[in-house]
Image (cartoon, rainbow, N blue to C red):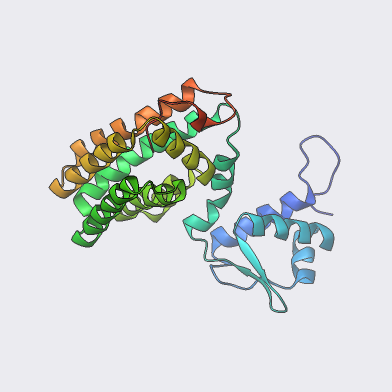
Amino acid sequence: MAGAGSGRGARSQVEVVIDGMTAMLTSGELAAGARLPVEKDLAERFGVSRGSLREAVRALAILGVVETRQGDGTYVTSLEPARLLGPLRFFADLELPGTAWQLLGIRRVLEMETVSVAAVAIGAEDLARLEGLLDGVEELARDDGDIEAFIDADAEFHTVIANAAGNPALAALVQSLVGRTQRARLWRAVAERGAVAATQAEHRAILRELRRGDPERARIRMAVHLLGVEQFARDHVGEPALGDAPGASDG
């Protein structure tokens, strides 16, 4: 069968199917929302067993490329960036030793560019939304709000900015780089050191430059905001809980 073989470097049948499906998508033979050909035809086309085909389809489903509808067949998904980048979010949430600060460094670089673009593209509605989010955080701080509420507000603040840049792929990538577990630990560290006010001041500074429409100053403010948490994560590699030590600045 095509793709089968036991020699070093030989592609597995699953890889043959994945490569073949990728080719069908990139050539336009299959498009977002299209139904896949029946199992028998695909297996014959790729020269693989039906078992290998099913295993490859399951792998593609995990990656967000296809979805199986009970009793209706298998379809290509919307192929939206947020869906396809889901596995990266899972990796970020794993927090493998040494990876947290690396991912945060990538995020800092990307968000510096994102906020720069957003500074000249953001509209009045999004600016008002950002203002409301920051006002809400101040209310939470006064009322000793729970960590989940802080996490949600912080995530939405950065999401609004990322979306305002008008590049869905970049926005999805930014949102995937910090998992919820890591964000919770960072916010816990902020709360434990009493630094919510300082974090709010950094958020306010970013918003101020967005209102001014100043790309370069917005970039600098975002860099300052994210550099502290990146350095904190780097300095505490291997510690069992990122938020157990003081000194973090929120992301």
Q: Is residue 49 visible?
A: no
The residue located at (66%, 52%) in the rendering is 19
Would residue 95 appear left or right of 216 to someone viewing this image? Answer: right
The one of 50 and 142 positioned closer to us in this rendering? 142
As drawn, the residue found furthest toward the front would be 143
Residue 33, quarter of the rendered image = bottom right
The residue located at (17%, 44%) in the rendering is 208
The picture places residue 22, in percent across and down from the top left corner, at 61, 56
Would residue 219 appear left or right of 63 to someone viewing this image? Answer: left
The one of 156 and 60 positioned closer to us in this rendering? 156
**Dividing the image into 4 quarters, which one contains the C terminus?**
top left
The one of 10 and 187 positioned closer to us in this rendering? 187
Relative to 68, does residue 206 appear above or below in the rendering? above
The one of 118 and 51 positioned closer to us in this rendering? 118
Q: Is residue 35 visible?
A: yes
The picture places residue 40, in percent across and down from the top left corner, at 80, 70
Would residue 109 appear left or right of 203 to someone viewing this image? Answer: right
As drawn, the residue found furthest toward the left would be 212
The residue located at (31%, 45%) in the rendering is 114
